[in-house]
Image (cartoon, helix red, strand yellow):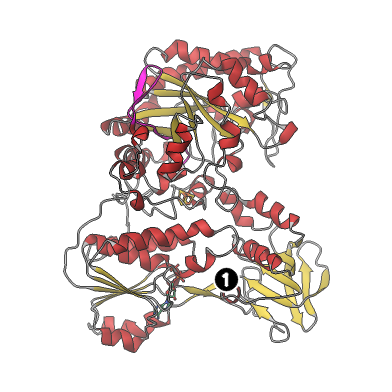
Amino acid sequence: MDDYSILFEPLAIGPVLAPNRFYQVPHCNGMGYRHPKALAAMRAVKAQGGWGVVCTEETEIHPSSDLSPFIEGRIWDDSDLPAMQLMTEAVHEHGALAGIELTYNGHQAYNLYSRLPALGVRALSTGYNPWQARCMDKEDIRNVRRWHRLAALRARQAGFDIIYCYAGHNLSLAMHFLSPRYNDRSDEYGGSLENRVRFLREIIEDTKEAVGDTCAVAVRLAVDELLGDDGITCQADGYEIIAMLAELPDLWDINVSDWENDSAPSRFAKLGYQEKYIAFVKTLTSKPVVGVGRYTSPEAMVSAIQRGLVDFIGAARPSIADPFLPQKIKEGRVEDIRECIGCNICVTGDLLTVPIRCTQNPTMGEEWRRGWHPEVINPRKKGEAVLVIGGGPAGLECARALGQRGYQVVLTEARREFGGRVALEASLPGLSEWRRVIDWRLTQIDKLSNVTLYPSSLMNAEDIRQADFKRLVLATGAHWRADGISRARRKPLSGLDLLPVFSPDDLMAGISLQGHIIIFDDDHYYMGSVLAERLTAMGCQVSLVTPAPLVSYWTQNTLEQKRIQERLARLGIRFYLQHVLESVDQAGVRIKDLISGGMAELACDGLVLVTERRSNDQLYYQLKPLLDSGLLTHLSLIGDAQAPHLIAQAVYSGHLAAREMDEQRNEALPFRREI
Ligand code: ADP
Ligand code: SF4
């Protein structure tokens, strides 16, 4: 067996001892102060799964740094402590340390709830918000230092072992002080690096003085903003800041900024992508260093430690996709690790202000409200076998979870390969890691003697009747429509028979195109953009028409949008933003500018419609009479066959159907709420 023992060595962080080197770095989750029981249960599962340190998300220290509408942690006064204690007690119960990321966001705080003026290093605005922060004077700086100190004392009282001074992601006042881009002060807090570091140094010293005898004081620092000379870089200021403060904190939690760079998706960044930026840190300090880089392989983790890059393996997404990752490594069950696919659906919870979810781990966010555990499942109550039709993400997860419950399961799939849409989409540019959704499920099913797979088995209603199962789950997926109906256009498009027209299904089936191809993207997620990449790679000239003001608009929620648009622009793809298709003829398409109403003709050799999908639910309606007549005792429709949605939702739907088989369901309120 490989030797991973170094990962399980206890390691001191100032006055506290981490039981191992698995460190769940702070990560947001859309639960925060609003869903404290759910949050505590989610963090507890990570501690139970072997993460030696489990941290909070950004935690607001004062109402003048209120992050609403985003739902983060809150430690404004003592009334927040009972909620915080739920987490620390739950984490301690499993022998892990609890860390808290105290946060004062400066001009990045919207203060929509508190309605207090934001305090910034200068009078800065943020995003497209028509307001600005107030430039802090010396009294404001003293106040923020005092608030930070009081929050640290409260955090200790709540039971936290590690207390953060946060200077990362461009979301923190301390980082704004460091950055010449924001800091134009002429007092002792601006100008030279020594002066720009002053505020961070002061809050570290304040925190150490307040709680440093019993709690570790960590600094989360962005050492590179990936902006070249316009930002902090690991060759210049990033390096010098660590050199200046090297021995001051008890732990360095190092990453790149901003959040889009730190949580880079797999489409753009592979395992260990931060190593080149953070490699220098351990040459300057004797204090332990945490780094992240979507490490899911124990070999890569051991190597990062042995190469002297980090002391702790930091993880947000790998711990979300598999809260039991450390435990599985410890038990030599590496093949059981549910590896993160780097899709950033977890991030959407925070940005859309709802509890976190994960493509790979359907139990994420459901630990308290549905009582789901990532490794444990309710055993079956009845003995009847189940036939699942369709081996996409929904069918695979349903069959796997039913098998885990102890049911006899047969899973049939029309194609030779299992995986449904994931198998097809993972072959598109940049999406190969998505295969992990299939691989993990097939590996698990392989271990279950009660689940049988039948590939190359297209089933019609008669085949299903003859198979003689009483319980049937249909996971038959969906297909892309090619009639031009979409969000922006609710009636069919005329002239589609005059021009070669393709759907994403055609392209994923391997059709090869030439010449100038127009993609009409009214789906707004990744599909339009990855097809544009694929067509460009085939040698086509590609134009992308979309009603949205940005390419792949929804990918703002997965932190991918800027990178996608930049990549397509670099590939020479021409964009027609805020345009819709008006008509089609032999020569090309007519498009309408949604702002001016102006029309334009675009000559092309083919049109790809990335619009909406239709559920494959015919079998369901053919078989429903069997349920009504009692020949079937269970019939359900799950995943995209129920309603086209994200892959994450297909997996969730499959998991839910498996958990609910033979269980009492409360239609009115299927889960617990925190009132
Ligand atoms: P989901 O995302 O809901 O899992 P997918 O489209 O990814 O949906 O997968 C559906 C799978 O079901 C596809 O692999 C498809 O080949 C398979 N399938 C659809 N209809 C049948 C059928 N009648 N018999 C067997 N397999 C089917
Ligand atoms: Fe990884 Fe995607 Fe899960 Fe996030 S949602 S943890 S990126 S698999």
Q: Quadrant of residue 497?
A: bottom right
Task: Relative to 219, say whether 264 is above or below.
Answer: below
Question: In the figure, is residue 467 to the left or right of 500?
Answer: left
Which one is nearer the viewer's eye here, 317 or 576? 317
Give the position of the N terminus as an image quadrant.
top left
Q: Is residue 221 above or below residue 215?
A: below
Left or right position of 100 against 586: left
| Total number of numbered discs in the rendering | 1
Q: Position of residue 611 (x, y in %)?
A: 61, 70
Rendered residue at 28%/86% (across/down): 465
Residue 122 visible (yes or no)? yes
Q: Which residue is mark 1?
A: 612
Q: Which quarter of the frame holds ligand 1?
A: bottom left
Residue 191 at x, y = what percent?
74, 17
Residue at the (62%, 62%) spot, across then down? 530
Task: Pick whichever, 255 or 349, lies toward us.
Answer: 255
Give the residues drawn in magenta, as a range.
Answer: 9-29
